[in-house]
Structure formats: C-alpha cells, structure tokens
Image: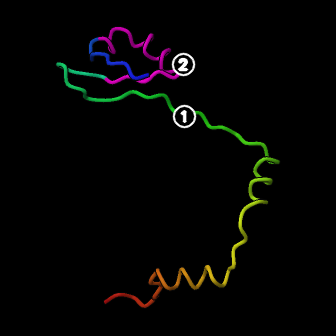
Amino acid sequence: MRRQITQRELRNASGEVMRALDSGDTFVVTRNGVAVGELTPIRRRRFVAKDAVVAAFARAASIDFVRFRDDLDRVIDQDVTPRV
C-alpha cells in the first residue's frame, strides 16, 4: 500500500520508514504538498528449483535454428562493411 509522507516525516522518522520498507510498504514523499519521489522496497530475488526450471523448458517449443537465423537476417542489417 502506498503511503504519503512529507520530507520532514522522512527525515524525522527514517528508522520507522526503513522498517516499513523492509516489510514491503511503499511511500510517496512530498515537499510542500507536491509529490517528489517514491520509495519502494527492492524486490528480493526468488530462486526457483532446478527441477522446476528443467520441467518448464521441457514443455517449451523447439527452435528451428535455420528458420530463426533467416528471420534475424531478414530483420537485422548485419552488414560488416565499415561506414564512410
């Protein structure tokens, strides 16, 4: 949930704000009633078990390398000639 706090509240209660960020809260910081920034917690990395990843890729469509390369060549200019 986004909570509005003033610049002064951020300065005076920084410890409380940091603990709230740690627990997932988001803040919009205002100065003179105007929003000037947003404090959001950093997303924690989630590790997925190897077996789950292998199972997910096992169901993925196979890639035809020749067709894939043809598609790339058609879309991307890969001319290695230096520009003048």
Residue for badge 1? 43
Image position, residue 72 (x, y; %): 53, 80
Where 50 sits versus 22, above or below?
Answer: below
Residue 10, magenta (yes or no): yes
Q: Position of residue 64 (x, y in %)?
A: 69, 79
Residue 49 on image: x %, y %: 78, 43
Q: Is residue 23 magenta?
A: yes
| Magenta part of the chain | 9-28
Q: Which quadrant is home to the C terminus?
A: bottom left
Task: Please name the residue shown 42% across and 24% down the image.
Answer: 26
**Amino acid type indicated by mark 2:** Ser
Question: What mark, if any, has residue 13 been given in the picture?
Answer: none
Q: Position of residue 2 (x, y in %)?
A: 39, 23
- Give the residue at x 66% y 85%: 66
Position of the N terminus by quadrant: top left
Q: Residues within 10 Å of mark 2 (few under 14, many from 20)?
A: few
Looking at the image, is mark 1 or mark 2 earlier in the sequence?
Answer: 2
Q: Secondary structure at mark 1?
A: loop
Q: To which quarter of the image does residue 83 belong?
A: bottom left
Nearest the eye: 78 or 74: 74
- The residue at 33%/24% (across/down) is 28
Residue 58 relative to residue 71: left or right: right
Among the 4 quarters of the image, the one containing residue 34:
top left
Indicate which disc residue 23 carries.
2
83 or 7, which lies in front? 7
- Tag 2's secondary structure? loop
Label 1 CA crowd tier, 10 Å (few <14, some 14–19, many 20+): few
